[in-house]
Image (tube, helix red, strand yellow):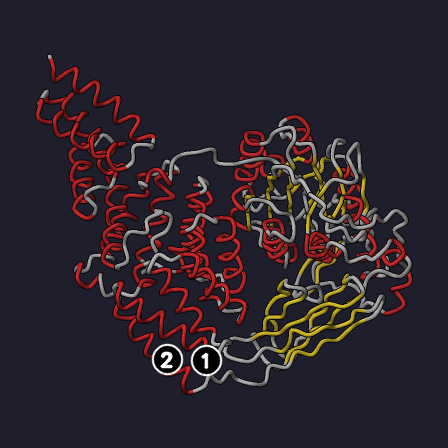
Amino acid sequence: MSFASHITKKSYYLGLALLALGFTCLALGQNPPAPTPEQGRDLTRVEDAAKPVDNQKVTIPRSYALVVGIASYKNLPEKAQLKYSNRDAEDIYTTLISTGGGNFPAENVHKLINEAATLQNFRKELEDWLPSVTKPEDRVLIYFAGHGFISAGTAYLAPYDVDPANIANTALPMQELGKTVGTSIHGKWKVLITDACHSGAITPEDDTAKVNQSLLEVNSSMFSITASRDREQSFESPQWGGGHGIFTYYVIKGLEGEADASGDGIVTADELSDYVRTNVRLATRTLQNPTSDRGSFDPNMVLAYNPGRSGKCADKQSCTDKPRYGTLVVETNMDGVEVWLDDKSLGVFNRGAAQRFPGIMPGPHIVKGIHLGYEPDGPREEQVYPGQDTTVSIRILIAKQHGRAAVELFDRGLDYYNRGFESNYKLAASEFEQALGVDPQYSRAALYLGRSYQALYDEDKAKLYLKKAIDIDADYSEARLSYAAVLLDTGNLDEAIRQTNAVINRDPANGMAWYLQSQAFVRKGSYGLGVESGGKAIQFAPASAEAHLWYAEALRMNGQCSAAAPEYASYLSLSNFNSAIAGKLNYYVLGSLIGFGSKKRATQQDIWRELRAQANVGLCDCEWMAKQFQNAEESCQRALTYAHDEPYANYRLGVVYAEEYNKAGNRNLLKEARSHFDTVIRVNPETDEAQRSRKYIANIDAVLAQ
């Protein structure tokens, strides 16, 4: 299948979903009072908790979200800067796209973090994007973490570039937000979640009570929940999951499943509201009291679905007849330890810095601590008790030792692998498989076994062994990226984005994670998001040829050819080595061949040729759009020297020759054009380009017959 058939312009977005505006104006320099066990007494019982339903089918509407987080403001003084609202937004994003959380398609969730969250960008997302993609049966979520304030009696949200001296023209009025949500953004389920306070006030007249009331009244047709009431402040602290606004921390934990009081795997609006309110009040000794206003909305709307938690309650009494939440306190004996709770990462921990995770449903939980190169601590069961702290000490003690026989097998396999070519990959796979048989916990052998099978275009085995490497070492970022590459090869784009996002959360400067993510967004038709991820790839991996290639692809498909052309040129320069060398290069040095659906090649030289063909096709396309037909002809001809049957290169070259005929009247140009259109139809007759090629040929034949 042609390059163009995989990256055709299609609808940028698929559906609209839950509108949750998580608005945070967080208290600066203040921590909430330390929680005490006595606080566990002030708990709410769920009287109507339903029994879990066996084999329950949960229907989740099309879902869209806007996630905004601003910690550093361009024009505000130091005292008004926030600490964790950008991290709040990043973690909300991760929770929303998780299959054990919001279940939002990744391309349907837009992020504006810090300097990207300008008023212009904010309005563009609210007033242009969401209204253009949402439909009446969708679910919509908007999350905002930042400042809210009052000026001249009007309530505003503060974008990154708010100017205290010109508020009317640099901030977003909440009344305007309400009008947009109510009249322009469609959806059957909309939720507004706001977190407002005014430590480090922007204007002298800031009034917490008025801001909170304005947010609750933004639109009467949605479910609204604010972080506090009256003149209360909203706290942020490093105590909460390593650094969060307290309100947002509980929103995240609730969506991850802790709010599922009925034990059916579904988190409803009522359940989230009850969970967040109960736990925030306990955490702050009632100094902060979240408030909700359901308007005319369905309290049973599905905010998140966690199928792994379904059936946690044996009966209604077991969920309702006791205080519901406890606290997990995690400490480790070394730096860089990742801790997992019930198959969800709690983050990376350092020794001497215990972290608290309140709001955990009482009962048994599976805890595991991992550090690459060491034997894990766990998985083991830890009991969380209602209203109490449960301290878990993670001890990473034993460096992984692989037997001599396994190491020798691995080393032989690696030698074959690094030689390249199909025959060597087959020999490498045999050695790696034997090494893994000798030592089933040899994650590096599993990684390279998966890579060998990917180089041989056996995606099923590649996925099997790469997933095994991750199961052995969940913090193995290299394995996650290799797994993401195979997922992209096989079309599982959403899971590929989740895998790259997991790596980025651990290592925000990982250039390969960013350019793999850029590829995924381009293939999903989310070109703007592809540009964002591609730009990050260039920032963190400027010497990576593939970073430039996929950034260029995203720019071109987003209509930014003038910016794409130099990126294509950078890729071609960085990958300009002899083809014989290309045949020997490691598969992952060249970059994996993503999304072409081809299994006929098993050499690095073929991959190198196809990627260079792709870059030249991109240049040809941009030059054609700029009506630089001679340059376009040269670029497409270069593409065909690498892959002479490449359909899109043949199609575009045929069009270029037709354009040149219109200028010069040379009938030989028409004959050349016809030949290239014939190739398009022969190689892949089902593509849009093939259909258009048939029409061109009919016209050409009519002209030549005259």
Q: Residues within 10 Å of mark 2 (few under 14, many from 20)?
A: many
Residue at left offset 70%, top offset 50%: 201
Residue at left offset 20%, top offset 57%: 576
- Image position of 542 (left or right of 124): left
Toward the viewer: 431 or 263? 431
Res 438 label? 1
Q: Pick the quarter of the image with the C terminus.
A: top left
What amino acid type is highlighted by mark number 2? Leu
Residue at left offset 76%, top offset 50%: 264
Find numbered disc 1 in the image and state the secondary structure of the residue it sits on: helix
Locate residue 620, reporting x and y percent: 23, 38
What amino acid type is highlighted by mark number 1? Val
- Image position of 628 (left or right of 453): left
Residue at left offset 63%, top offset 68%: 340
Locate residue 594, reporting x and y percent: 37, 51
Q: Which residue carries the number 2 mark?
A: 409
Toward the viewer: 299 or 56? 56
Residue 524: which quarter of the image?
A: top left
Q: Residues within 10 Å of mark 1 (few under 14, many from 20)?
A: some
Residue 452: which quarter of the image?
A: bottom left
Mark pair 1, 2: CA separation: 9 Å
- Mark 1 and mark 2 in contact? Answer it, CB < 8 Å: yes
Q: Pick the quarter of the image with the N terminus.
A: top left
